[in-house]
Image (cartoon, grey):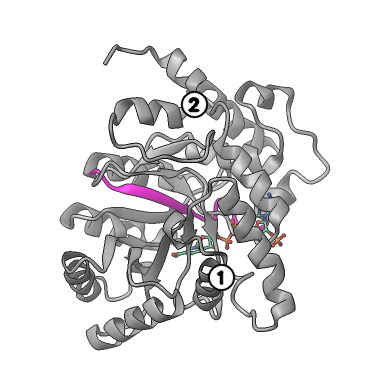
């Protein structure tokens, strides 16, 4: 393959760049979304996924499911794939299972969930419940939630992976006081994925966890990419800076997400979204150019000053 300089890669977008570096491993896909490879397999996934904490947690009435169905439908139609859930998110797994099954899009969705309970047998039972709730025979990724009984559950997850029932395994956290223990697991275990909190105004994982993930060949999913509502509140009433156009950014959500997914170690971000217009907006961050190192610095200075 001919060598390509960095400027050309940036202009092409990271998705196209990933495609060029992984010949023969790209599947047919809707045009335009930037994708990055999972290091352990080379399979690529779109850099923006969908998180299901909170807004999917207490949903029983059909009227409450309708906007979520529209969100997942729009997300999938636009080429979105990764949906992140957890057995601890109330009704979320059930709602996702029902919607994905009802829309007939299971083959287009990368389903990620977690195991989040103490004890081997309780973990096995919780995982079996996830298969039922998600209405699937294969779960793409199960991660140990917040390091809860990590060693016990990683053994179970490895057995499930060997049996072909799950495709990837990992660990998650969203607490800085767990980073040290999290890094220790990353150093001693072979994992496909890690999931960690990282946002334009919460950059600590960028200095330690993300470089370690790159070194260890682990895919990175980012949780809390907007710090829940925190980043939107910080910029309330402000216009996007003119230079946001330099990386094809048309909204604050895209500003925050493009910052995250332009980190070289990040594979995807999973913003929580329960409105179809959010799906359109957020997947816009997986299109066009991404900020380079100089623009990323400028974004950091901008948010530090507001
Ligand atoms: N330890 C762990 O494993 C862990 C911990 C935390 C989270 N997570 C995962 O990470 C995901 C993301 O976290 P999160 O949902 O709590 O927080 P988040 O993604 O930082 O923020 C989500 C909120 O941002 C707002 N939003 C989303 N798209 C928007 C847009 N385009 N324009 C304006 N506002 C927008 C929505 O607020 P409104 O709904 O109020 O409009 C939404 O609820 C979770 O869903 C979960 O899957 C994992």
Q: Which quarter of the figure has residue 115?
A: bottom left
Q: Please tell me whether the stretch drawn in magenta is mainly helix, strand or loop.
A: loop
Q: Nearer the viewer, residue 211 or 45?
A: 45
- Callout 1–callout 2 Cβ contact below 8 Å: no
Residue 130: in magenta span: no
Q: Check if residue 228 falls in the magenta segment.
A: yes
Q: Residue at x 73, y 28 (%)?
A: 241
Task: Report the quarter where the N terminus lies.
Answer: top left
- Which numbered dot is residue 168? none
Residue hosting label 2: 13
Residue 121 x/y as whole percent: 24, 87
**Residue 273 visible (yes or no):** no
Which sits in the foreground, 154 or 276? 276
**Residue at horizontal 27%, vertical 53%?**
192
Q: Which mark is residue 102?
A: 1
Q: Does 150 sit above or below residue 18?
A: below
- Numbered range of the magenta stretch: 217-229
x, y percent for residue 70: 68, 61
Q: Residue at x 52, y 66 (%)?
A: 100
Relative image position of residue 109 (x, y in whole percent): 46, 57
- Circle 1 SS class: helix
Which quadrant of the figure shows ligand 1?
bottom right
Residue in the image at 38% along x and 12% along y: 5
């Amino acid at each position: 393959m001919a060598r390509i300089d960095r400027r050309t890669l940036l202009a092409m977008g990271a998705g196209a760049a990933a495609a060029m570096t992984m010949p023969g491993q790209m599947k047919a896909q809707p045009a335009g979304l930037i994708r990055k490879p999972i290091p352990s397999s080379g399979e690529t996934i779109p850099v923006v996924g969908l998180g299901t904490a909170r807004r999917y947690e207490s949903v029983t009435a059909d009227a409450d499911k309708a906007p979520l169905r529209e969100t997942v439908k729009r997300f999938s139609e636009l080429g979105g794939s990764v949906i992140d859930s957890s057995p601890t998110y109330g009704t979320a797994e059930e709602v996702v299972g029902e919607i994905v099954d009802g829309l007939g899009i299971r083959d287009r969705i990368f389903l990620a969930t977690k195991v989040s309970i103490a004890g081997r047998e309780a973990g096995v039972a919780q995982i079996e419940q996830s298969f039922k709730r998600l209405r699937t025979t294969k779960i793409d990724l199960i991660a140990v939630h917040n390091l809860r009984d990590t060693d016990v559950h990683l053994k179970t997850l490895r057995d499930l992976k060997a049996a072909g029932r799950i495709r990837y395994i990992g660990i998650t956290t969203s607490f800085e006081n767990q980073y040290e223990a999290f890094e220790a697991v990353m150093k001693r275990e072979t994992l496909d994925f890690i999931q960690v909190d990282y946002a334009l105004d919460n950059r600590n994982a960028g200095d330690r966890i993300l470089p370690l993930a790159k070194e260890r060949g682990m895919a990175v999913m980012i949780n809390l990419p907007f710090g829940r509502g925190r980043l939107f509140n910080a910029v309330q009433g402000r216009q996007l800076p003119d230079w946001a156009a330099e990386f094809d950014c048309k909204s604050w959500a895209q500003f925050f997400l493009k910052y995250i997914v332009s980190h070289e170690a990040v594979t995807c971000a999973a913003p929580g979204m329960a409105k179809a217009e959010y799906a359109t907006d957020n997947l816009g961050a997986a299109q066009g150019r991404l900020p380079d190192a100089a623009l990323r610095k400028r974004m950091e200075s901008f948010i530090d000053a507001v």
